[in-house]
Structures are given as structure tokens and as C-alpha cells.
Image (cartoon, coloured by chain):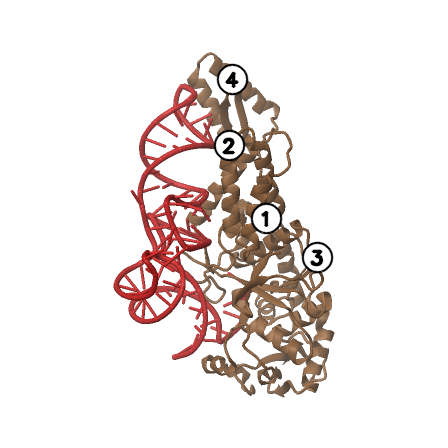
Amino acid sequence: MLALLDTATGEVAPLEPRVPGQLSVYLCGPTVAGVPHLGHARVNLVWDGLRRYLTWTGLHVHFVSNVTDIEDKIIAKAEEEGTCTEDVAARYEALWRETMARLGIEAPDDVPHATAYVEQMVALVGELVRRGAAYEAGDGVYFSTDAVPGYGLLARQDPATLRSGARVDAGEAGKRSPLDFVLWKYAKTGEPAWTSPWGLGRPGWHTECVVMSLDLLGEGFDLHLGGLDLSFPHHENERAQAVAAGYTFARRWAHNGMLVDEQGEKMSRSVGNGMSLPELLDRYDARVLRYLVLQTHYRSPMSVSEESLESARGAVRRLDNFAWETRDLPPAAADAEVVERFKGRLDDDFDTPGALAVLMGAVRAARGSTEHAPALAAAVRECCERALGLALRARAADLDREVAALVAERDGARASRDWGRADSIRSQLAAMGYAVEDGPAGTVVRHEGA
RNA sequence: GGCGGCGUGGCCGAGUGGUCCAGGCAAGGGCCUGCAAAGCCCUCUACAGCGGUUCGAUUCCGCUCGCCGCCUCCA
């Protein structure tokens, strides 16, 4: 069984599913108010990897990831673009889906939308008010963090120290404690609004995930995932509401590390140093990004730079070359020892860099042993593709007539030792996107790499 | 101010109380090749600093220095 660090306890512990053999997972999804950035790529690649791995080991994973389609940033964007929030949300969600597909992320089993859950959110807020865990203030209904014992669990700090560090937010003057947060925002004129016992308004951000995760996964679901920056206050506040309303919430929490730039500074929306994901995918094979993510431990900060991307590209090429070299090997069962070592690394807090190292070792070993090559190659392919979602490409070229003619001509030139002609055809083929390799059987071409 | 994390060879990035160890990229040398490409071999002999524990520490403890994150929107 895989062991994972639990953010709530700070300890690596085996992930014991609520129902044996089945794992219920919730991943905080995007607010669709802008172009997906590199940070989104990391979260989704990391947890897509975990999902694939667990599925590969035989678990049935129920994977839910939401879309926040009503939120202040969406309202601001709609105003800026002179359109409505539905239009903004729909457009950016479409872009989101497209970009995730380009990244090779498996679509979640369920994608709940906040706007489809407003009624249930209102009910939850009502329950919190009824239980005395929420109160009305100047501009909305607020959650009283004092009502929850152990508030600060995910930040691993007690409420007093959190309070002492809190910055005062002038816009939320009616709050009883700086840690309190809004559950229901009263609508200003012109803003999208829903009816509620407290008048027209819209839900606060922290409420939707509570309602949606409990609805789709049920109480005490297994694992709640997200970026480390969401652990506090977002996830803490989700937990606080659920607990205050009498629900058992997520049993486990895991968070991935942030992205940092070359200076080691976090990439974030507020700093504005994030990179557009679609733009990056125009320049790099999505597998390069996946490799870069996998070769960094999920909890470590990950730096993205031209250099780190080029390095990952080299590694993907190496794997593609291996797939190419071994394309005609007879089918074989995956080498059991490699698979065991691979799983051993992943089961220990999802050590993907260690697991990749095992596979790279198998690549080298396969090249050095014709006897074991089929089993080793099968293990590499199985682990890379099925367990981690990193598809290998042999990049075999199906030759059209023009290319086939050039290849034949080049073989002829080489046979007659006309090196000038052979080299010029090679450059011609390279310009067309084909890599040329001369083997004992003559010229072989394949598509250029990642 | 509080809490947490990190400092590994040219770069990225795992890991470990002790003998060889990551792994990838890059660079240099060699083999192979008509030349290449791909591949293979070798080299570049790392663990911030100072103490302590230990037969032995990069790995455990303490301190110092440096960097970063969270306490505000964020994945």
C-alpha cells in the first residue's frame, strides 16, 4: 500500500481506503477566470500521476475535481471584457479542458460546478448559522473560526499564533476575528446573485468544495489534494465548515509543492511571474513537462526554466530512443524485479524521481543484455506509460513516396561512396523533420524527437 | 513576529549512519560510424559552516549563516 505524507499530521502513513480497494479523491480545480498557468500543470500532472499509479496497482479511484465558475475574479474579468460571468467561465473552462487534454491529463470522473451547487451551499450556510458557527456582518455571512476546535490543523499552528500573524482586511470590517471568513457575500448592484435567507448574494469560495466533495464522495472520503498554497486557509476553512456542520470530512490531505522561478521565488498570480501553459505547450512536448514534474518530488519546490525544460527534453528523447531501439523485440512479461523496485519507490511517499531512476537503470541494463532486453523493455514501457502516464514514442516514420525515394537515393549514393550527395540528402531529410540513422541495413529515418 | 521547509558534484534533482551506488542534462575523452545520429565506456571524485553523539556522519542532535514558503488572492 502506498504511504503518503498527511498534511494534517506531518507524517508519512499508509493510505488506507475507507472501502478496501476503492479510493475517493478530491482535487481542488481551477477558477476559470484566466489562461491556465504552469502551476496548474504541476498540480494536475502530479495528481494525475498518483491517480494512474494507484489505478495501475489495482485500486478503483473515484477522482473528482471541481470548476469554480463564480468568484470575484470572474466577475472582475467579465466587467473588464464587457461581458457576463457565464461567458467568461464558459470560455476559460473550454480552454482549461483543452489545455488539460494537451497535457495528457485524464479527465476526472466528476467535474462539479459551483453554480450548480448554490442551493446546497445555502443549506450548509444555514446549518452553520443554526448551529451558531456563523453570523451576519456588514457585507455577508461569516464563519466563526472560534466555533471549531483545532482550527489551524492544516497550517499546523494554533489559532492564537495564526491570529497574531493575520493581516487586517479593511474590506471585511464586520469580522469578529481576523481568521473568520465569508460564507455568503451580499450582492452589490449588477453582480450575479442567488436568493438566500440573507438576501441576494453569492457563495464564498471556501464553501463549494465542502458541498461538492461530500455530495459526490460522501462523508469521510479518502484523500483531499491540492497545491500547498491552498492548505491554509482554503482547505482549513473547508474542513472547519464541514466539522462545524457535523460532517466527517476528508480523512487525509496531501499537497504538492509550489513552482519557483530561476531565482527560487514562488510563481504566483500576485507576483505575476507565472507562465502561460498553452504557450509553453506550443514550445514543448507535453511529455517534457510531465517528465520535469515527475523528476521532482511532489512536495519539493520545482523550478521551471529553459535549462530544466531542455534537460527533461533530453531525458524524454532518451526514452523515445529506447522505445525505437526495442520496437521489434518479442513480447515479454515485464521484468518483475524492476517493477518491484519501481513500486517500492512510489509506495514510499510517491518518490517519482526515484522510480524514474529505476527505469533509467533498466534502460541501460536492457541495452547491455540481449537476453533480458525484452522483459526489461516491457517493464520500462509498462511503468512509464501505464503507471505514470508518460507515453513513449518509437517515432517510426511511415514513409511517403517522396521520403522513400530520398532514402533509396541516399542508400545508392552511400553504396557508390558519394558522401557529398549522401550528406546533402541527410540535411534535406532533416529539414523535413526526419532523423537519419545509418545502420547495417541501410538508411533508416524516423521522426524528430520531443 | 509566529509556524514550516530547504541548503548535495557545471546545472536540475533523489537518497542513505559505514563497502561502489542515485538518475537526468551539460562538458571533455574514448569506442562504433565514410562523416554523423543513436548507443556504450570513462572523467569532472558532491553533500552550506562550526561543534556534538558515534568505532564511523552527507545522513542523528545543537548552533551559525544563507535561501524559500505560509499566516492575503493563488495550484
Which residue is under mark 1? A388
Which residue is under mark 4? A411
Say which element carries label 2: helix
Q: In the rendered image, is residue A318 in sight?
A: yes
Quadrant in which the N terminus of chain A appears: bottom right
C-alpha separation, residue under disc 4 versus residue under disc 1: 40 Å
Residue depicted at x 55% and y 75%: A153
Chain B, chosen colour in render: red
Which sits earlier in the primary sequence, circle 4 or circle 1?
A: 1
Q: Which mark is residue A367?
A: 2
Q: Is residue B59 above or below residue A320?
A: below
- Residue A139 horizontal side relative to residue B40, left or right: right
Check if mark 2's residue and mark 1's residue have beta carbons within 8 Å.
Answer: no
Query: What chain does badge 4 belong to?
Result: A
Q: Residues within 10 Å of mark 3 (few under 14, many from 20)?
A: few
- Residue A312 horizontal side relative to residue A213, left or right: left
Residue depicted at x 69% and y 84%: A198
Q: Amino acid under label 3?
A: Gly
Residue A409 in the image, given as x and y percentages of width and height: 53, 17
